[in-house]
Amino acid sequence: MTKNRLFAATAALCVAFTAVLSSGAVAAADEPGEGPSYVALGDSRASGPFVNAPSHRSFCLRSADKNYPAQLAKLIDASTFTDVTCAAAKPKHVIDTPQFVGTGYAPPQIEALAPDTELVTLSIGGGGSNHMPVSVRCAIPAPGLDSGCRNNPVAERLAVEGIDKMRAEVDATVAAIVDKAPDAEVYIVGHGGSVGLRSCWPNMPVSEEDVVWLHDYFERFNQIYVDAAEKYDAHYVDIAKAAVEGGHDACAPTGERWFEGVIPQAAAEPAHPNELAMTAIAEMVAADMAVR
């Protein structure tokens, strides 16, 4: 299927799927769809730990039916769907290194791709980054305090070093994907979303002054994905911008919050997307496919 035919078909299928949802009828999961063959790669931001905990069947903590790969597969009526996302995966676990998952090893995720794969989504880069040591330097133990991480040279050094390190690893990951599935449309989902431009102790335990710097750190980190998408003719999904500008960061009230904070108030891992974010990512990808 050519790219033009793929996206034309997806546009029609998205409309049809909306009609099916309205009628309450959904095609059986074991019936092949008419959309693209789809493989989901990545870490916990894609697998969705605890979003649907009863569905977890391994330490990869995939939330069947509720993580964004599963929701996207339904939206586009994927002809085949393979989800090999896994919590704690690093770029090397996508490319060439088996990942230990508690009771055994998951093979390198890229093995799920084939030359005729038509759609790939990727969420990677948190594991092995400096997100944690950078964020910890901004944390405050009580409201009204200020850690001053925005002026902390160690925090800035960690930010720069982590971005430089992950830029090379993400680039290698995307290069391997397009080499293994040269005709696939590749969507790279960015980081951030939990950290907006406001603080809300204890869920976002950062001062009002530092939270702006921490938000900027994630914007700088996301440039990794922007650059990789441009270099390899892939597509960047800026979920952080959609979450922050729409008021869906970790400080948003229940029902409007897409990303949890330090203390989750909905089913999700701390500082990770909840079900609403998973739905938003799936809809953003499907919408982009429909107009191409």
Image (cartoon, rainbow, N blue to C red):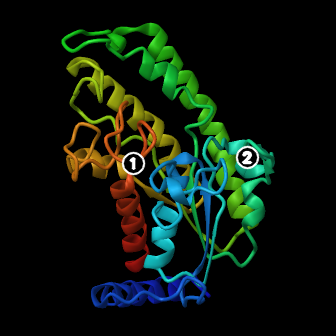
Foreground tag (1 vs 2): 1
Residue drawn at (65%, 54%), measured in percent from left and top? 174
Is 73 left, or right, of 253 in this rendering? right
Callout 2: SS: helix
Callout 1 touching callout 2 (CB < 8 Å): no
Number of disc labels = 2
Residue 65, how many percent across, how many down? 49, 67
Residue 52, how many percent across, how many down? 47, 56
Return the residue nearer the eye: 163 or 10. 10
Q: Is residue 227 visible?
A: yes
Please identify the quadrant where the N terminus is shown.
bottom right
Q: Which residue is mark 2?
A: 93
Return the residue nearer the eye: 231 or 237. 237
Above/below status of 145 relative to 35: above
Q: Which residue is mark 1?
A: 267
Q: In the figure, residue 143 lies in which quadrant?
A: top left
Above/below status of 101 relative to 58: above
Residue 100, how many percent across, how many down? 77, 42
Callout 1: SS: loop
Residue type, numbered disc 2:
His
Is 76 left, or right, of 186 in this rendering? left
Q: Count neighbours of disc 1 (C-alpha within 10 A) and say few if under 14, some if 14 to 19, many if 20 or more.
A: some
Residue 225, how many percent across, how many down? 51, 47
Please identify the quadrant where the C terminus is shown.
bottom left
Q: Count neighbours of disc 2 (C-alpha within 10 A) and say few if under 14, some if 14 to 19, many if 20 or more.
A: many
Residue drawn at (45%, 63%), measured in percent from left and top? 66
Residue type, numbered disc 1:
Ala
**Disc 1/disc 2 C-alpha distance (Å):** 26 Å
- Residue 171: mark: none
